[in-house]
Image: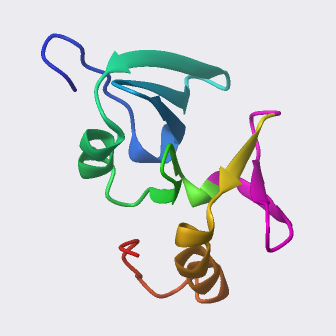
């Protein structure tokens, strides 16, 4: 939600968000099809509205329910998600918390590195 722009979806339909400067592209499921919508907003604002999503990079927020694989090495890691062909980078700053969350899925770990 941002001024006159509003997108109402189930949190489970959220796939990921990618920010670029003052804009955020939100990707979501819409009746078995992936849709995207561009907002004039910040990733911080989106994070506040999607508390169960995980920040994995300064520009990316993801729903871990769509995670299919984490690949790469210590210098460059990325994740693959279902529904999209794109890969999402994982920065070193967020990798430790993500690794902890993936190894303990039953725990509720806040993503605050």
Query: Does the magenta-highlighted stretch encompass residue 67?
Result: yes
Q: Residue furthest front?
A: 75
Q: For residue 57, which quarter of the picture?
A: bottom right
Q: For residue 31, which quarter of the picture?
A: top right
Q: Is residue 15 positioned above or below 73 on the image?
A: above
The structure residue drawn at horizontal position 62% and vertical position 69%, both measured from the top left corner, is: 92
Observer-nearest residue: 47 or 72?
72
In the rendered image, the quadrant that contains the C terminus is bottom left
- Give the magenta range: 66-85
The structure residue drawn at horizontal position 82% and vertical position 61%, both measured from the top left corner, is: 69
The structure residue drawn at horizontal position 75% and vertical position 55%, both measured from the top left corner, is: 79
- Determine whether, in the image, residue 38 is placed left or right of residue 99: left
The structure residue drawn at horizontal position 12% and vertical position 17%, both measured from the top left corner, is: 3
Query: Does the magenta-highlighted stretch encompass residue 29?
Result: no
- Determine whether, in the image, residue 46 is placed left or right of residue 32: left
Observer-nearest residue: 74 or 18?
74
Q: Residue furthest top?
A: 4
Q: Position of residue 73 (x, y in %)?
A: 86, 70
- Determine whether, in the image, residue 22 is placed left or right of residue 98: left
């Amino acid at each position: 939600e941002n001024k006159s722009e509003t997108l109402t979806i189930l949190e489970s339909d959220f796939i990921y968000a990618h920010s670029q400067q003052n804009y955020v592209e939100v990707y979501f499921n819409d009746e078995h099809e992936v849709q995207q919508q561009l907002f004039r907003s910040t990733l911080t604002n989106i994070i506040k509205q999607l508390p169960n999503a995980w920040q994995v990079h300064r520009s990316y927020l993801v729903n871990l329910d769509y995670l299919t694989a984490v690949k790469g090495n210590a210098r460059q890691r990325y994740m693959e998600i279902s529904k999209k062909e794109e890969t999402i980078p994982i920065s070193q700053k967020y990798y430790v918390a993500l690794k902890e969350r993936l190894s303990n899925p039953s725990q509720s770990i806040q993503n605050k590195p």
